[in-house]
Image (cartoon, grey):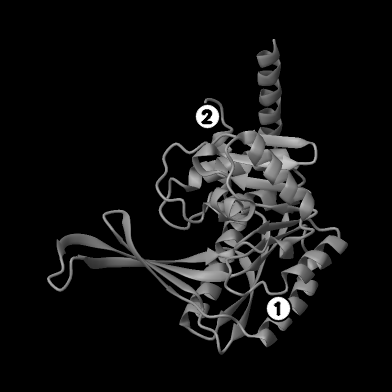
Protein backbone atom coordinates (compact mmCIF):
# COMPACT_ATOMS: atom_id res chain seq x y z
CA UNK A 1 0.00 0.00 0.00
CA UNK A 2 2.84 2.36 0.82
CA UNK A 3 4.45 1.82 -2.60
CA UNK A 4 1.07 2.25 -4.31
CA UNK A 5 0.60 5.57 -2.54
CA UNK A 6 4.09 6.67 -3.52
CA UNK A 7 3.46 5.71 -7.14
CA UNK A 8 0.16 7.59 -7.18
CA UNK A 9 1.96 10.62 -5.73
CA UNK A 10 4.68 10.49 -8.39
CA UNK A 11 2.04 10.03 -11.11
CA UNK A 12 0.18 13.06 -9.81
CA UNK A 13 3.35 15.15 -9.74
CA UNK A 14 4.23 14.11 -13.30
CA UNK A 15 0.71 14.91 -14.48
CA UNK A 16 0.98 18.37 -12.93
CA UNK A 17 4.37 19.04 -14.51
CA UNK A 18 3.11 17.61 -17.81
CA UNK A 19 0.30 20.13 -18.07
CA UNK A 20 2.81 22.85 -17.16
CA UNK A 21 5.34 21.82 -19.81
CA UNK A 22 2.77 21.20 -22.54
CA UNK A 23 0.95 24.50 -22.03
CA UNK A 24 1.92 26.75 -24.97
CA UNK A 25 2.52 29.88 -22.90
CA UNK A 26 4.22 28.39 -19.81
CA UNK A 27 7.65 29.86 -20.50
CA UNK A 28 6.84 32.81 -22.76
CA UNK A 29 6.62 35.29 -19.90
CA UNK A 30 9.51 33.85 -17.88
CA UNK A 31 12.30 36.44 -17.64
CA UNK A 32 15.80 35.24 -16.81
CA UNK A 33 18.96 37.30 -16.27
CA UNK A 34 22.20 35.34 -16.73
CA UNK A 35 25.47 36.85 -15.50
CA UNK A 36 28.91 35.27 -15.55
CA UNK A 37 31.91 34.14 -17.52
CA UNK A 38 31.29 33.65 -21.22
CA UNK A 39 33.49 31.84 -23.67
CA UNK A 40 33.54 30.78 -27.28
CA UNK A 41 33.62 27.03 -27.84
CA UNK A 42 35.31 26.16 -31.12
CA UNK A 43 35.26 22.66 -32.57
CA UNK A 44 37.56 21.37 -35.29
CA UNK A 45 36.24 18.11 -36.71
CA UNK A 46 38.31 15.77 -38.82
CA UNK A 47 39.51 12.29 -39.64
CA UNK A 48 42.41 10.49 -37.97
CA UNK A 49 44.17 8.18 -40.39
CA UNK A 50 47.82 8.14 -39.29
CA UNK A 51 50.33 8.92 -36.56
CA UNK A 52 52.65 11.88 -36.96
CA UNK A 53 56.25 11.03 -37.93
CA UNK A 54 57.39 13.92 -35.71
CA UNK A 55 55.89 12.60 -32.45
CA UNK A 56 53.63 9.72 -31.31
CA UNK A 57 50.42 11.74 -31.76
CA UNK A 58 47.50 11.36 -34.18
CA UNK A 59 47.29 13.58 -37.25
CA UNK A 60 43.83 15.10 -37.67
CA UNK A 61 42.81 16.23 -41.14
CA UNK A 62 40.28 18.96 -40.30
CA UNK A 63 37.20 18.82 -42.54
CA UNK A 64 34.95 21.40 -40.89
CA UNK A 65 34.59 23.59 -37.83
CA UNK A 66 31.83 24.96 -35.58
CA UNK A 67 31.46 27.77 -33.07
CA UNK A 68 29.09 27.62 -30.09
CA UNK A 69 28.51 29.88 -27.07
CA UNK A 70 30.07 28.47 -23.90
CA UNK A 71 29.96 29.13 -20.16
CA UNK A 72 27.31 31.63 -19.10
CA UNK A 73 26.50 32.15 -22.80
CA UNK A 74 25.55 28.46 -23.02
CA UNK A 75 23.33 28.87 -19.95
CA UNK A 76 21.59 31.79 -21.66
CA UNK A 77 21.03 29.93 -24.93
CA UNK A 78 19.64 26.93 -23.02
CA UNK A 79 17.13 29.19 -21.26
CA UNK A 80 16.20 30.82 -24.57
CA UNK A 81 15.74 27.40 -26.23
CA UNK A 82 12.96 26.72 -23.72
CA UNK A 83 11.17 29.88 -24.80
CA UNK A 84 12.07 32.27 -21.98
CA UNK A 85 13.00 35.93 -22.39
CA UNK A 86 16.73 35.98 -21.60
CA UNK A 87 19.25 38.73 -20.94
CA UNK A 88 22.98 37.98 -20.68
CA UNK A 89 25.52 40.24 -18.97
CA UNK A 90 29.23 39.57 -19.31
CA UNK A 91 32.64 40.82 -20.46
CA UNK A 92 34.51 39.98 -23.67
CA UNK A 93 37.54 41.34 -25.47
CA UNK A 94 37.63 43.76 -28.38
CA UNK A 95 38.44 40.90 -30.72
CA UNK A 96 37.05 38.58 -33.34
CA UNK A 97 35.93 36.00 -30.75
CA UNK A 98 33.93 38.67 -28.91
CA UNK A 99 32.27 39.63 -32.19
CA UNK A 100 31.41 35.99 -32.80
CA UNK A 101 29.81 35.65 -29.37
CA UNK A 102 27.71 38.79 -29.91
CA UNK A 103 26.52 37.43 -33.25
CA UNK A 104 25.81 33.95 -31.89
CA UNK A 105 23.78 35.26 -28.96
CA UNK A 106 21.66 37.41 -31.29
CA UNK A 107 20.92 34.32 -33.38
CA UNK A 108 19.82 32.50 -30.18
CA UNK A 109 17.34 35.30 -29.32
CA UNK A 110 19.34 36.37 -26.27
CA UNK A 111 19.63 40.06 -25.36
CA UNK A 112 23.38 40.11 -24.74
CA UNK A 113 25.02 43.04 -22.97
CA UNK A 114 28.69 42.27 -23.53
CA UNK A 115 31.12 44.83 -22.14
CA UNK A 116 34.28 45.16 -24.24
CA UNK A 117 37.64 45.15 -22.47
CA UNK A 118 40.54 46.14 -24.79
CA UNK A 119 43.00 44.43 -22.46
CA UNK A 120 41.12 41.15 -22.45
CA UNK A 121 41.30 38.20 -24.81
CA UNK A 122 37.87 36.62 -25.08
CA UNK A 123 38.04 33.15 -23.55
CA UNK A 124 38.22 30.46 -26.24
CA UNK A 125 38.09 26.71 -25.74
CA UNK A 126 39.29 24.99 -28.89
CA UNK A 127 38.44 21.29 -29.13
CA UNK A 128 39.85 18.96 -31.77
CA UNK A 129 37.49 16.07 -32.47
CA UNK A 130 38.33 12.97 -34.50
CA UNK A 131 36.12 9.92 -34.97
CA UNK A 132 33.52 11.51 -32.67
CA UNK A 133 36.02 11.66 -29.81
CA UNK A 134 37.68 14.73 -28.32
CA UNK A 135 41.43 14.43 -28.88
CA UNK A 136 42.66 17.78 -27.55
CA UNK A 137 41.44 20.99 -25.92
CA UNK A 138 43.34 24.29 -26.03
CA UNK A 139 42.28 27.22 -23.80
CA UNK A 140 42.93 30.94 -24.39
CA UNK A 141 41.96 33.28 -21.53
CA UNK A 142 42.84 36.40 -19.50
CA UNK A 143 41.18 38.28 -16.60
CA UNK A 144 38.94 41.36 -17.22
CA UNK A 145 39.94 44.77 -15.85
CA UNK A 146 38.52 46.37 -12.70
CA UNK A 147 36.98 49.31 -14.60
CA UNK A 148 34.99 47.09 -16.97
CA UNK A 149 33.71 45.01 -14.05
CA UNK A 150 32.50 48.15 -12.26
CA UNK A 151 30.51 49.13 -15.34
CA UNK A 152 29.10 45.63 -15.50
CA UNK A 153 27.83 45.94 -11.91
CA UNK A 154 26.01 49.16 -12.86
CA UNK A 155 24.31 47.36 -15.74
CA UNK A 156 23.37 44.51 -13.41
CA UNK A 157 21.35 46.90 -11.27
CA UNK A 158 19.61 48.23 -14.37
CA UNK A 159 18.75 44.78 -15.78
CA UNK A 160 17.65 43.36 -12.44
CA UNK A 161 14.25 45.08 -12.49
CA UNK A 162 13.21 43.23 -15.64
CA UNK A 163 14.15 39.75 -14.37
CA UNK A 164 12.14 37.12 -12.51
CA UNK A 165 15.18 34.96 -11.73
CA UNK A 166 18.94 35.63 -11.70
CA UNK A 167 21.46 32.96 -12.69
CA UNK A 168 25.12 33.55 -11.79
CA UNK A 169 27.36 31.23 -13.82
CA UNK A 170 30.84 31.17 -12.30
CA UNK A 171 33.58 29.59 -14.40
CA UNK A 172 36.41 31.14 -12.40
CA UNK A 173 37.51 33.51 -15.20
CA UNK A 174 37.17 36.71 -13.15
CA UNK A 175 33.88 38.01 -14.51
CA UNK A 176 32.01 37.66 -11.21
CA UNK A 177 34.30 39.67 -8.97
CA UNK A 178 31.27 41.50 -7.53
CA UNK A 179 29.14 38.40 -7.00
CA UNK A 180 28.47 39.21 -3.33
CA UNK A 181 27.00 42.59 -4.23
CA UNK A 182 24.95 40.99 -7.01
CA UNK A 183 23.45 38.42 -4.65
CA UNK A 184 22.63 41.10 -2.09
CA UNK A 185 21.02 43.38 -4.69
CA UNK A 186 18.96 40.57 -6.18
CA UNK A 187 17.71 39.26 -2.82
CA UNK A 188 16.79 42.77 -1.67
CA UNK A 189 14.76 43.07 -4.87
CA UNK A 190 13.02 39.77 -4.08
CA UNK A 191 14.60 37.88 -6.99
CA UNK A 192 15.68 34.23 -6.60
CA UNK A 193 19.41 33.78 -7.25
CA UNK A 194 20.76 30.50 -8.64
CA UNK A 195 24.53 30.02 -8.62
CA UNK A 196 26.65 27.50 -10.49
CA UNK A 197 29.79 27.64 -8.30
CA UNK A 198 33.47 27.24 -8.99
CA UNK A 199 36.51 26.68 -6.77
CA UNK A 200 36.46 26.19 -3.01
CA UNK A 201 35.69 29.71 -1.74
CA UNK A 202 31.94 29.30 -1.28
CA UNK A 203 31.64 32.09 1.29
CA UNK A 204 31.15 34.56 -1.55
CA UNK A 205 27.93 32.76 -2.50
CA UNK A 206 26.39 33.42 0.91
CA UNK A 207 22.69 34.25 0.81
CA UNK A 208 21.97 32.80 -2.63
CA UNK A 209 18.69 30.97 -3.12
CA UNK A 210 20.23 27.84 -4.63
CA UNK A 211 23.72 26.49 -5.32
CA UNK A 212 24.21 23.74 -7.95
CA UNK A 213 27.67 22.14 -7.46
CA UNK A 214 28.42 18.87 -9.20
CA UNK A 215 29.65 15.89 -7.21
CA UNK A 216 33.34 16.73 -7.63
CA UNK A 217 32.86 20.40 -6.79
CA UNK A 218 30.90 19.55 -3.66
CA UNK A 219 33.56 17.04 -2.55
CA UNK A 220 36.25 19.72 -2.99
CA UNK A 221 34.42 21.96 -0.50
CA UNK A 222 32.81 19.50 1.92
CA UNK A 223 35.22 16.55 1.82
CA UNK A 224 34.60 12.88 1.12
CA UNK A 225 31.60 10.92 2.36
CA UNK A 226 31.01 7.20 2.83
CA UNK A 227 27.20 7.05 2.99
CA UNK A 228 24.06 8.90 1.99
CA UNK A 229 23.60 9.93 5.60
CA UNK A 230 27.04 11.52 5.72
CA UNK A 231 26.44 13.23 2.37
CA UNK A 232 23.14 14.64 3.64
CA UNK A 233 24.80 15.87 6.82
CA UNK A 234 27.57 17.63 4.89
CA UNK A 235 25.05 19.14 2.47
CA UNK A 236 22.92 20.48 5.31
CA UNK A 237 25.96 21.93 7.06
CA UNK A 238 26.95 23.79 3.89
CA UNK A 239 23.39 24.91 3.16
CA UNK A 240 22.82 26.22 6.67
CA UNK A 241 26.33 27.69 6.98
CA UNK A 242 25.91 29.79 3.82
CA UNK A 243 22.31 30.77 4.54
CA UNK A 244 21.04 29.09 1.35
CA UNK A 245 17.43 28.15 0.79
CA UNK A 246 18.51 25.02 -1.07
CA UNK A 247 21.50 23.07 -2.34
CA UNK A 248 21.32 20.88 -5.45
CA UNK A 249 24.17 18.40 -5.89
CA UNK A 250 24.32 16.96 -9.41
CA UNK A 251 25.80 13.47 -9.17
CA UNK A 252 26.39 12.28 -12.73
CA UNK A 253 25.20 8.65 -13.09
CA UNK A 254 23.71 8.85 -9.59
CA UNK A 255 21.26 11.56 -10.59
CA UNK A 256 20.80 14.69 -8.49
CA UNK A 257 19.75 15.46 -4.93
CA UNK A 258 18.02 18.58 -3.62
CA UNK A 259 18.66 19.53 0.01
CA UNK A 260 16.30 21.93 1.80
CA UNK A 261 15.34 22.66 5.39
CA UNK A 262 12.52 20.11 5.19
CA UNK A 263 14.76 17.30 3.95
CA UNK A 264 16.32 15.81 0.82
CA UNK A 265 14.69 14.92 -2.50
CA UNK A 266 16.45 12.67 -5.00
CA UNK A 267 16.06 12.23 -8.75
CA UNK A 268 17.73 9.23 -10.41
CA UNK A 269 19.71 9.78 -13.62
CA UNK A 270 17.59 9.69 -16.77
CA UNK A 271 20.23 9.55 -19.50
CA UNK A 272 19.53 6.92 -22.16
CA UNK A 273 23.00 7.31 -23.68
CA UNK A 274 25.90 9.39 -22.38
CA UNK A 275 27.88 10.87 -25.25
CA UNK A 276 29.31 14.11 -23.84
CA UNK A 277 28.76 15.64 -20.39
CA UNK A 278 30.32 19.03 -21.22
CA UNK A 279 27.78 21.78 -20.66
CA UNK A 280 25.29 19.55 -18.84
CA UNK A 281 25.51 21.74 -15.73
CA UNK A 282 24.60 24.74 -17.89
CA UNK A 283 21.47 22.96 -19.08
CA UNK A 284 20.49 22.02 -15.53
CA UNK A 285 20.73 25.51 -14.05
CA UNK A 286 19.11 27.11 -17.12
CA UNK A 287 16.14 24.74 -16.88
CA UNK A 288 15.83 25.35 -13.15
CA UNK A 289 15.87 29.10 -13.73
CA UNK A 290 13.22 29.03 -16.45
CA UNK A 291 10.95 26.75 -14.42
CA UNK A 292 11.19 28.96 -11.34
CA UNK A 293 10.66 32.12 -13.41
CA UNK A 294 7.53 30.52 -14.86
CA UNK A 295 6.14 29.87 -11.38
CA UNK A 296 7.11 26.25 -10.69
CA UNK A 297 8.34 25.02 -7.33
CA UNK A 298 11.85 23.67 -6.76
CA UNK A 299 10.91 19.95 -6.74
CA UNK A 300 9.11 20.24 -10.10
CA UNK A 301 11.93 22.39 -11.47
CA UNK A 302 14.49 19.77 -10.45
CA UNK A 303 12.47 16.97 -12.07
CA UNK A 304 12.38 18.78 -15.41
CA UNK A 305 16.05 19.83 -15.13
CA UNK A 306 16.96 16.18 -14.57
CA UNK A 307 15.09 15.20 -17.74
CA UNK A 308 16.86 17.97 -19.67
CA UNK A 309 20.25 16.76 -18.42
CA UNK A 310 19.43 13.24 -19.59
CA UNK A 311 18.76 14.58 -23.06
CA UNK A 312 21.72 16.93 -23.43
CA UNK A 313 24.42 14.40 -22.45
CA UNK A 314 23.41 12.43 -25.52
CA UNK A 315 24.63 15.29 -27.72
CA UNK A 316 28.17 16.31 -28.72
CA UNK A 317 29.69 19.36 -27.05
CA UNK A 318 27.88 22.33 -25.56
CA UNK A 319 24.29 21.88 -26.68
CA UNK A 320 20.74 22.85 -25.77
CA UNK A 321 17.48 21.06 -25.03
CA UNK A 322 14.48 22.47 -26.82
CA UNK A 323 11.00 22.92 -25.43
CA UNK A 324 9.81 20.32 -27.95
CA UNK A 325 12.30 17.73 -26.72
CA UNK A 326 11.08 18.19 -23.16
CA UNK A 327 7.48 17.95 -24.28
CA UNK A 328 8.19 14.55 -25.83
CA UNK A 329 9.21 13.29 -22.39
CA UNK A 330 5.67 13.95 -21.21
CA UNK A 331 3.83 12.40 -24.11
CA UNK A 332 2.09 9.04 -23.54
CA UNK A 333 4.43 6.03 -23.55
CA UNK A 334 7.47 8.27 -22.95
CA UNK A 335 9.87 8.27 -19.93
x, y (%) of residue 232? 68, 39
Judging depth in this view, the residue of 250 and 155 nearest the camera is 250
Judging depth in this view, the residue of 102 and 138 nearest the camera is 138
Identify the residue at the far top of this view. Answer: 1
Judging depth in this view, the residue of 217 and 107 nearest the camera is 217
Q: Is residue 244 visible?
A: no
281 w.r.t. 128: above or below: above
Q: In the displayed structure, does residue 41 sit left or right of residue 255?
A: left
Disc 1 is placed on an element classified as: helix
x, y (%) of residue 1? 69, 10
181 w.r.t. 256: above or below: below
Identify the residue at the far bottom of this view. Answer: 118
Q: Nearer the viewer, mark 2 or mark 1?
A: 1
x, y (%) of residue 38? 56, 70
Q: In the displayed structure, does residue 111 sit left or right of residue 63?
A: right
- Within-10-Å neighbours for mark 1: few <14, some 14–19, many 20+: many
Quarter of the image where one finds residue 161: bottom right
x, y (%) of residue 175? 63, 74
287 w.r.t. 331: above or below: below
Q: In the displayed structure, does residue 128 sit left or right of residue 263?
A: left
Q: CA distance from mark 2 to mark 1?
A: 44 Å
> Which residue does the numbered mark 1 point to in the structure image?
152
Quarter of the image where one finds residue 178: bottom right
For image coordinates 68% across by 41% down, the residue present is 258
Disc 2 is placed on an element classified as: loop
For image coordinates 67% across by 49% down, the residue present is 288
For image coordinates 46% across by 47% down, the residue present is 313
> Which residue does the numbered mark 2 point to in the structure image?
334
72 w.r.t. 297: above or below: below
Amino acid sequence: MKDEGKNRGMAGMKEGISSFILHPSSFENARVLVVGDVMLDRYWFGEVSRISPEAPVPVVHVSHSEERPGGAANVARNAAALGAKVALLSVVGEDEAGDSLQRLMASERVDAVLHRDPGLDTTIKLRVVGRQQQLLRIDFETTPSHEVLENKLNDFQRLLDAADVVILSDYGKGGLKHIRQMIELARKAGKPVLVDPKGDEYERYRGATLLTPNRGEFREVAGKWSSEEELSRKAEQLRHGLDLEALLVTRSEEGMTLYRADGALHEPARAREVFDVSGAGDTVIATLGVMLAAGAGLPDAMHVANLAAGIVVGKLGTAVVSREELQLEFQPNQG
